[in-house]
Image: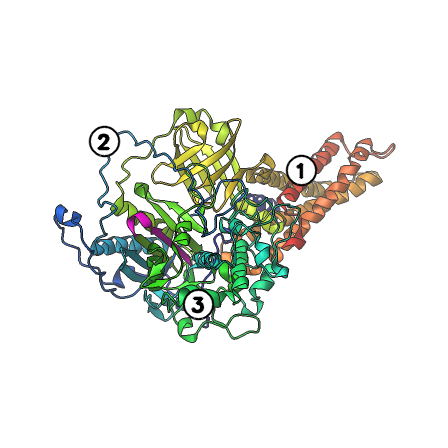
Amino acid sequence: MLIRSAVFAAAALALLLLPQTIALAQDDTAKPAHQADAPALPKRPIPYAKLNAKPAKPKPKPADAQASAGSPKPPPTTPKPAPPAAAAPKPVISAPAPDVDAAQPDAAPPPAPVASPPAAPPPGPPAPSARLAPGQPLPAAELEAFVDGVMNDAMAREHIAGATVSVVQNGQVLLKKGYGFSNLNPQRPVDPDRTLFRVGSISKTFTWIAVMKEVEAGRLRLNQPVNLYLPEKAQVKDQGYDQPVRVANLMDHSAGFEDRALGQLFERKFDRVRPLDLYLRQERPKRVHAPGVVSSYSNYGAALAGEAASYVAGKPYERLVEDEIINPLGMAHTTFREPHDPKAGLPAPMSPALAADVSDGYRWTPGGFQRRDYEFIEQIAPAGAGSSTAGDMARYMLMQLGGGQLSGVTVYGPTTAQAFRTPLRQTPIGINGWAHGFMVFDLPGGHRGYGHGGATLSFFSNMVVVPDLNLGIFVSTNTDTGRSLVNRLPERIVQRFYAAPDLFPRPGSPDLAQRRSDYAGYYLTTRRTYSGLEGFVDALQGGASVDVSRDGHLVTSDSSGMAAWAPEGDPAEGRFIRTQGAERIAFDLADGRARAFHVANGTQAFIRAPIWREPRMLALLAAFTAAAAVATLAGVAARNRREFRENQIQSRASLVQNIQAVLWLLALVLFGFWSSKSGDQAQVMYRWPGILMITASACALVAAGLTATTVLVVPSIWRGGRRVDSWSHLRKAFFTATVLIYAAFSADLALWGALSPWSG
């Protein structure tokens, strides 16, 4: 039984892949009502097809009629509302670049990065052309039927309780609809005009608009140190870096901060929520890169930017975005406030009317939907505290497509509008960077989108505007299984109507197959904590494996799944495009060997890890350690059955070895048990680090300390006593082998940050 437990523990430690530590700026505004009893919730996916009447199939029109120019029909009336769906686009990575010196609104915008060359078409018959030209409007009825199909299928397959969608084009709302439920007990359908979803990091776009409005007012400059615009206690410390963090570094996530989240990004209990300025002082992250070197997504950096805009404007952040963006646009169902009792030092709470319309958040389990507690994120509001409806987000997208104007209201001027279409710095070909805080998306058909994704513990959201199509798409879900749906929907709409279908996957390259060793390996994300127990967990789950298939495709694998890529040009150049789709990655090469890679929109880079930072090496050492510990204890049981003698040094060394074996097995079992309980991200977030993780780390730390002692006595063990020496050469060799195994495992755990129980 002990051996079985040890083997399980070693395997569990090797596979310790937590759900991602809340990647994007997360936020949600869920109703603080009392929790419904779990048994009252549905045990199976909701039959969405029965909730909304199926729209009548549009009659086919002649091709020339569809192609004719003219205004689109008014959007159909929203049938029975359904719950909103939270969306979050895939994290993407920005390439390292020189210092940022962003242009101000009164200066010419910085040059856009070099455009990527178009991918060579795959062999075979010519692909059909796109159904609609960029100037042609979407047919509203056909759009609704298509979106209904995508949403209903995904929600049933992926177990999503509720979702909401809005699509705008040419100054009109083409689609505004809810799917499923915002609350399951009692059941309440999603209303696209009333049901608030927590939009997570989409909140950051409000922060970047607020920053640029302060630039327009002359109170803030992008190329100046952010410390000039912060209260003294919130200012960024040097931490050994000569270059200051500039405002522009915050907008393209190149300030150089590590990314910390566990135990402090979200709060379940309102009494733990702190004012923004206090949070910025108490949760200050380490600086791990010089400013402007590499983009690494930072919620803390966005919060600093919001604090800077608030400080120079002379009003609290929540009131700033209300006065400058939300109220002028008539977004009556959008807020950065949260539902709670009034508390000194915190912004006023959300109004009762809005709080009553906030969707609950859900987790899907084999037993059914579980309602989650409200996730407070007010302490870092500029990074993710926004809540909104599909209807309000439609107005928000129309304003962006209108260059900062909507219905006679000007939110920002033309220079700022251009900035939100212009990456702040040059990036590798195919990597889009950050357009002054907005993500840049490559879409099918060569179209380019701008926007942001968002995620909380339960909600996923996505907002993409496509200027050349005058199109905007928003989608949000209220269940923790919604990530894939919100990532896919904007791309699928553009692919369906404005891009030729992908008939053939892009072929691999025989040359790439011969260069496997140049790319294959394990790469660690720059978006992580760099030390301590959170660093240990981040390194285990925040990496990507890269390999090359026999047919010459690059294959990447991370916590979100696997993807295949084809070389875009010469494989030696390090540029790749998805075998189907428009997504790209680019590698940094040194002497022909990959040292890092970057993914399209700039949230992080992946750096090649040395072998001792690879999970497989940690797993191998864990397995050897478990085997050595089990063999040690088995030897004790065997030796107790016969009389044996040993000198004093050997006796003490044997005792220490036995204690080590127990401690290592206990540490491995606890690490494994913690891993088995880590599937619920909310529990990991709220209870971090927890008694299991702390105890496991403490056991490993003591065992590692004892290992240092046994290393010193190995020579004495081999010398033995003059008259009494019962240890055979085999016993001495076994003792030495266990010491070496424990020492190697101790060193590797120390490098991973696992030997610091105080660091949680």
User: Sequence-wise, which precedes: disc 1 or disc 2?
Assistant: 2
Viewer-side label of 2, 3:
3
- Name the residue carrying label 1: 744
Which color mode does the image show? rainbow
In the image, 162 versus 625, the foreground residue is 162
Tell me the kind of residue under disc 2.
Pro
Asked if one can make out residue 12 in the rendered structure from this viewpoint, the answer is no
Which is nearer the N-term, disc 2 or disc 3? 2
Start and end of the magenta stretch? 457-470
- Say if 117 sits above or below 679 in the image: above
Asked whether the residues under the numbered discs 2 and 3 touch, taking CB atoms below 8 Å apart as contact, a structural biologist would say no
Residue 730 location in percent, x, y?
72, 31
383 drawn magenta: no
Q: CA distance from mark 1 to mark 2?
A: 57 Å
Q: Secondary structure at mark 3?
A: helix
Vertical comparison of 239 with 742: above or below: below
Name the kind of residue labelled 1 in the image. Answer: Ala
For label 1, the SS is helix
Q: Quickly name the residue at label 2.
A: 125
Alpha-carbon span between mark 2 and mark 3:
56 Å
Q: Is residue 191 left or right of residue 572?
A: left
Q: Which residue is mark 3?
A: 323
Q: CA distance from mark 3 to mark 1?
A: 59 Å
